[in-house]
Image (spheres, rainbow, N blue to C red):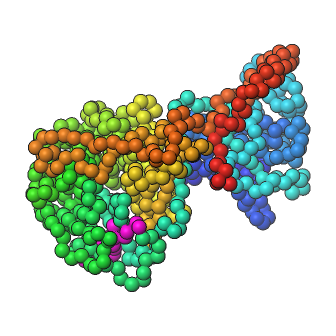
Amino acid sequence: MLVPLFDDDTGLLMLAGIGDTAVDCFEVSTAEPFLTQSHCLTDASTRGIAMVPKLALDVISCEVVRVLQLTDSCIVPISYQVPRKSGQEFHDDLYPDTVGTTPAMSAAEWWKGGNKQVDKVSLHPDKRPKPAAKQMPVKKELPRGGSKESTSSSPLSTPSSTAAPSRSPSSTSGLSSGFLPSPSQSVKTIQNMLPTSKFRHIQGAVMHRDKHITNIRNLNLTTPGESDGFCVNRQRVAVPLAIAGGQIAVFERSGPGRQPDTALPTIQNSVNVVDFSWDPFDTHRLAVGDDAKIRMWQVPEGGLKETLTQPKLILQHTEKIYSIKFHPLASGVLVSSSYDLTVRLWNLESGEQVKILTGHQDQVFGMAWSPDGKLLATVCKDGKVRIYDPRKSAAPVQEGPGPEGHRGARVVWVCDGKYLLVSGFDRSERVLYLFSADSLSSGPIANAALNVSPSTLIPFYDHDTSVVILSGKGDTRVYIYELVPEDPYFIECSSFNSPEPHKGLAFLPKTECNVRDVEIAVGLMLTKTTIEPVAFRVPRVKKEFFQDDVYPDTAVWWEPALTASAWLSGSNGQHKKLSLKPKDMTPSEAPKEAPVRKYLPSSVYLEEKTDEQKKEELLSAMVSKLGNMDDPLPQESFEGVDDEEW
């Protein structure tokens, strides 16, 4: 929903969408081009927006509009200023007389038919009306330059500003384009002191076209909401096709480029695919769930050379399947959910069903194994989140209230398996819920509302960095959060926007990341005809060092810790760990982030001081600087762009 605000004096129209991070400013004119746009990107999603009264503007800094953006944690002023060479004069052409604050008539007079207009007042600092004695004590008129109540902000545009080149407006043509938005760090900012994240400025970027798989034909865009839409491993990608027989195309990542126009060899699954997944310990084995069966397909070395029609193994269900998940530690263990409201545990070594988990009263939206492989979490349409210990009991060991909405949800274990993250819906918005894995019955301990959209958010969680990346089918925006096991729990990071709506986003294993470019995640984005890799990078200056704070030792995910029979008999295990540091890189040990200004404008500190105090402090500061010539320059600690990237 767009919230419009209009300033009659300047003809400026402000538009902000609830849940968006952009605030648009349009100069409305009665002649062409009619609308001239200025674009301001902010750090957080908008929950509300309001315009500051004209009498509160800093007219000496040529501030023509100031709006206040309400976010989840703060109120941020956004100032729009016209750049002028003289910053100490009042520009009459920018500030026509504006509506005053004295009412023109009483309510009774208006009801009787009165139509008086509110008197206009000048915005000139020397001509402004003095406050009435009844409202507040009479103050000594402030000197030329604005009142203490006005908030001054630097006329700097945001990095993403697309404002038109500034030009001096004339008194005959009215206001011109070139208003520069500036989210202001000022005394009026009301902001909680939230913890910062080293991933706050994470950058997502689509990789070069020579890594794309293009010309994909007959893509199936109607897979159920419980499916991710396609699945990937470090060697290949499986994509469902809208061709009779439930066919699945398999593309080798080692052979990107344009696919031939002729028919490709496929996996013929006989019926339409519902959900499918690669075996984490066998890059050739693909499990496919459909109407009432799970078929295990074996892709030959080097990829498909001919059409596959016979699966290696078939597991028989009683009804249609919702979703399937491989065990993260034990080879040959699979779990599936079905329309019969059961969750079934399978031993692929014997090809037999091991146990049926019960307790669900409606459709099972999502399932997730705990990092240690002991527990299984589910989120259900009946409004419950459940945790099972499948080797000990068919009934849930814990149960608690889940999302209010009934349009789909996903669940994933986070923060070393101590919490559950559920992406679902309330009555209107998409919401993230955080549960303590030890007390589901207490309900969520924190939540974060995102936006209004019909698609279910699919989470990818990186256990090494505690970063979660979320996106839905048909979305263009990819949300990124760092999760922490204490308040505020959700630390919002920069989001990534794809050029067009994508049909799915699946992530490669951590070992596929290029640590030399400080990549913490690499995903494959599915569009209507292409598969495009997207890298998520943390901006660092000295990339010649291994960023050890970003890359702790990671799990050897491709080696199982247990066999199916060992796990089912009660044994537990864990993955071995390995370092991602290349042999020719030196650890950074203490990498420095880009400095963030946390101080207020100098005018605030000097506001109540005498001229003598100001002179003394200024002189002391200059002497101090001269006495520290050997100290490193401030810019040496700044984040910037690597020389090779210019």
Q: Is residue 195 magenta-colored?
A: no
Where in the figure is residue 628, as x and y percent of width and height?
A: 76, 23
- In the image, is 157 to the left or to the right of 4? right
- In the displayed structure, would residue 427 be above or below residue 296? above
Where in the figure is residue 598, as x and y percent of width and height?
A: 64, 30
Q: Is residue 253 magenta-colored?
A: yes
Instruction: Give the residue at x 36% y 33%.
Output: 445
Instruction: Give the residue at x 78% y 62%.
Output: 30
**Magenta residues, as a range?**
238-254
Where in the figure is residue 102, as x and y percent of width and height?
A: 76, 33
Where in the figure is residue 617, as x and y percent of width and height?
A: 81, 18
In this rendering, does residue 50 appear at all?
no
- In the image, is 576 to the left or to the right of 593? left
- In the displayed structure, would residue 12 be above or below residue 230? above
In this rendering, does residue 265 appear at all?
yes
- In the displayed structure, would residue 96 be above or below residue 637? below
Question: Residue 402 appears in which quarter of the rendering?
Answer: top left
Instruction: Give the residue at x 80% y 28%.
Output: 147
Quadrant of the image for the C terminus?
bottom right
Question: Residue 267 appears in which quarter of the rendering?
Answer: bottom left
Instruction: Give the residue at x 20% y 65%.
Output: 296
- In the displayed structure, would residue 217 be above or below residue 382? below
Along the line of sight, the residue nearer the viewer: 108 or 52 = 52
